[in-house]
Image (cartoon, helix red, strand yellow):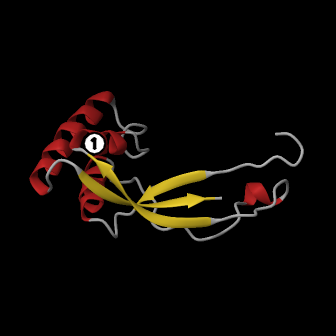
Amino acid sequence: MKKDGELVIAFMNWLPKEDFITEKSLGLVKKYNPNWEAFNDRNPIVVPKWCERNFRMTTFYSYDEYIPFTYESWNGRIKASRGVGASLSEEEVQTFSNEHLELLKSIIDDNFSILHEITIM
């Protein structure tokens, strides 16, 4: 980074305690990966430790946004999570994926929105 440059970090968390579909999806993740606890809820407003020495935080905000999904796109988002795609075997991921799609079809119509907390710093 050049002198006086700016670094922007943005990320979003799904909120299983505040969104029914996310709660159900997370329940299924926990069935396949019962020890996984790396999912997030709301983030506290803190300056990351790695940032304290070399950066000065000038902006931090977060807001809630409903993000549109289909069965396939939400299934893909969940499969890409650390609790599924990064932790399970290919066979387990495929089995999870099939069961997750069936779950979604049983609780919601295709084309739905999922509550996310979006954080920018």
Choose between 67 and 37: the one closer to the eye.
67
Q: Callout 1, which amino acid?
A: Asn
**Among all residues in the image, which is located at the extreme right?**
3
From this view, report whether residue 54 is shown above or below residue 23. Answer: above
Please state the horizontal and vertical placement of residue 84, each as a whole percent of the image: 36, 42
**Among all residues in the image, which is located at the extreme top?**
90
Tell whether 66 sits left or right of 48.
Answer: left
Please state the horizontal and vertical placement of residue 9, each as a whole percent of the image: 64, 51
Q: Residue at x 34, y 45 (%)?
A: 78
Give the quadrant of residue 71: top left
Image quarter in which the C terminus is found: bottom right
Tell whether 39 sits left or right of 112.
Answer: right
Please state the horizontal and vertical placement of residue 58, each as a whole percent of the image: 75, 64
Q: Residue at x 73, y 48 (%)?
A: 7
From this view, report whether residue 24 is shown above or below residue 46. Answer: above
Local secondary structure at mark 1: helix
**Among all residues in the image, which is located at the extreme left?**
106
Tell whether 7 sits left or right of 72.
Answer: right
- All told, the count of numbered labels is 1
Please state the horizontal and vertical placement of residue 118, each as a whole percent of the image: 50, 59
Image quarter in which the N terminus is found: top right
Tell whether 17 sits left or right of 82.
Answer: left
Judging by the rendered image, the residue that carries numbered circle 1 is 75
Q: Residue at x 28, y 62 (%)?
A: 23
From this view, report whether residue 56 is shown above or below residue 45. Answer: above
Give the quadrant of residue 89: top left
